Image: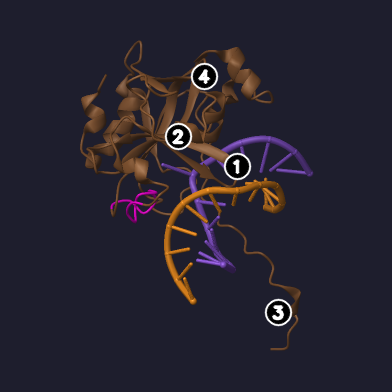
Chain colours: A brown, B purple, C orange
Amino acid sequence: MTYPWLDAPAAQVADTARTLLGWTVSAGGVTVRLTEVEAYAGTGEDPASHAHRGPTPRNKVMFGPAGHVYVYFVFGMHWCANIVCGRDGEAAAVLLRAGEVVDGVETARERRPRATDRELARGPARLVTALGLGREANGTSAIDGTGPLLLTPPASPVDPARIVAGPRVGVAAAHDLPWRFWLADEPSVSVYRRHTPRRRPAPAASVRNSPA
DNA sequence: TAAGGGATTGGA
DNA sequence: CCAATCCCTTAT
């Protein structure tokens, strides 16, 4: 299976992200209908993108074929998943930010026991947890059935009038770029949070107390 | 080799 | 609001 719009030039990754709304992703016995996504461009085009400064061991999957899964690890504990977009060699990707669990709800509840149903996949790391994914999904295909994740077209197309755009969540750069897309009136869409700069650790006492 | 910081989340 | 927690990136 292949979807031409996934392979569209990286410059159109925002359109690709919008197209993904309403599609479902299935893994580990759970199916999620995507209600919120974010677009990230490739090298040199988007300071918030992991691929901004060129290929590295972490982001190399982004430079590979469209339709593959780019999984990354953040804050020492969370995994998040993207669908790679663009032509081969380009490095655009769409972050799967949130969705509604439409099948396998009981399995998702087991994976996130403390979550209410609307919060099972409300957030990129929550979504990955609900699907039972992790590092092993990195670099696998989401469109040919060979990997743990399978991307499937929506039963009924999304009404474009329901798509809302705004700034991406938690990014330190390119605040002004409205590359987060979500469906209006969906309870599974996550709450906007601005990037919070990390507090510096307190200076060592020996340094702080040394005479000036 | 060391240090800084992060496309987040859950709990005060 | 803040801590958790570790991997990757960048700079010595």
User: What residue is shown with label 2?
Assistant: A81
User: What residue is shown with label 4?
Assistant: A28
Q: Nearer the viewer, mark 4 or mark 2?
A: 4
Q: Quadrant of the C terminus of chain A?
A: bottom right
Label 4 lies in what chain?
Answer: A
Residue A207, disc? 3
Asked if A6 appears above or below A32 in the picture, the reply is below
- Foreground of the two, A111 or A163: A111
Q: Report helix, strand or loop for mark 4.
A: loop
Where residue A59 sits in the image (x, y, percent)? 39, 46
Residue stretch rendered in magenta on the structure: A45-55
* Residue type beneath disc 2: Ala
Q: Main secondary structure of the magenta part?
A: loop
Label 2 lies in what chain?
Answer: A
Distance between the alpha carbons at the discs numbered 3 and 4: 52 Å
User: What residue is shown with label 1?
Assistant: A77
Does the residue at mark 2 contact the one at mark 3 (Cβ under 8 Å)? no
* Residue type beneath disc 3: Val
Q: Residue at x 69, y 26 (%)?
A: A114
Does the residue at mark 4 contact the one at mark 1 (Cβ under 8 Å)? no
- Near mark 1 (Cα within 10 A), the count class, few <14, some 14-19 or many ≥20, is few
